Image (cartoon, rainbow, N blue to C red):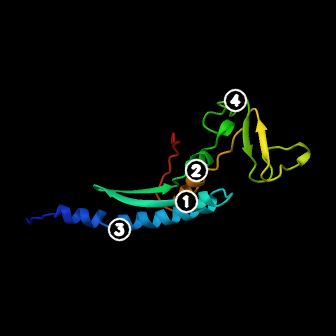
Amino acid sequence: MGRVTINEPALRQALTGPRSVAVRTADRLGRQITNQAKANAPVDDGRLRGSIGYTVRVEGSRVILTVGSPLKYALYRHNGTGIYGPRHARIYPKNGSVLRFTVKGGALGPQPRGRRRPRGRVVFARSVRGVPANPFLYDALRAVLAGMPGARVHRTTPTS
């Protein structure tokens, strides 16, 4: 009979240390998912696309990869708003009787006789349908993990 002694701190360092296989794999996946999310993200002025990034951190024996954007409106672009969002209801003004906003780019929903609203025009509306979802982060995660055997993606809807 022989005796085996495991140096647990050294084993933990080998598995979760800064140069461990788990941290290097998470870093590689973070780069791939971020690049794919940037390719999928909607572009108006490029602010959302440029804000997408990732972090890798170690908590105890867990390696945690986080990919996302710090911008508040990223969640609304990802999950949709109004009738396209989680509540499936039109957006009405909270104060006052109409919504007022400036059109950023071309057409905004169906237009009479195919006309486009000019850029920078101020629009007033009693309600709006909202913005359709563009799940650019979820789609990026699915695309990158598609080639990994045994990887599963479960979609959850963050509250904000």
Is 57 situated above or below 97? below
Q: Earlier in the sequence, mark 4 or mark 1?
A: 1
On screen, residue 133 above or below 49: above
Label ID, residue 88 = none
Which numbered circle lies on residue 21? 3
Q: Which residue is mark 2?
A: 74
Q: Give the distance between the C-alpha atoms of the residues marked 4 and 1, in whole angstroms.
A: 33 Å
The residue at which mark 1 appears reads as 51
| Dot in front, 4 or 1 | 4
Q: Earlier in the sequence, mark 3 or mark 4?
A: 3
Left or right? Give the position of 138 relative to 20: right
Question: Who is closer to the viewer here, 120 or 69?
Answer: 120
Q: Residue at 47% x, 60% y: name it.
A: 54
* Residue type indicated by callout 1: Ser
Image quadrant where one finds the N terminus: bottom left
Q: Picture quarter containing residue 123?
A: top right
Q: Residue at x 77, y 36 (%)?
A: 125
Q: Are marks 2 and 1 in contact (CB under 8 Å)?
A: yes
Circle 2: element type = helix
How far apart are labels 1 and 3 at the CA level?
27 Å
Comes first in the chain, label 2 or label 4: 2
> As drawn, which residue projects farthest toward the bottom?
19
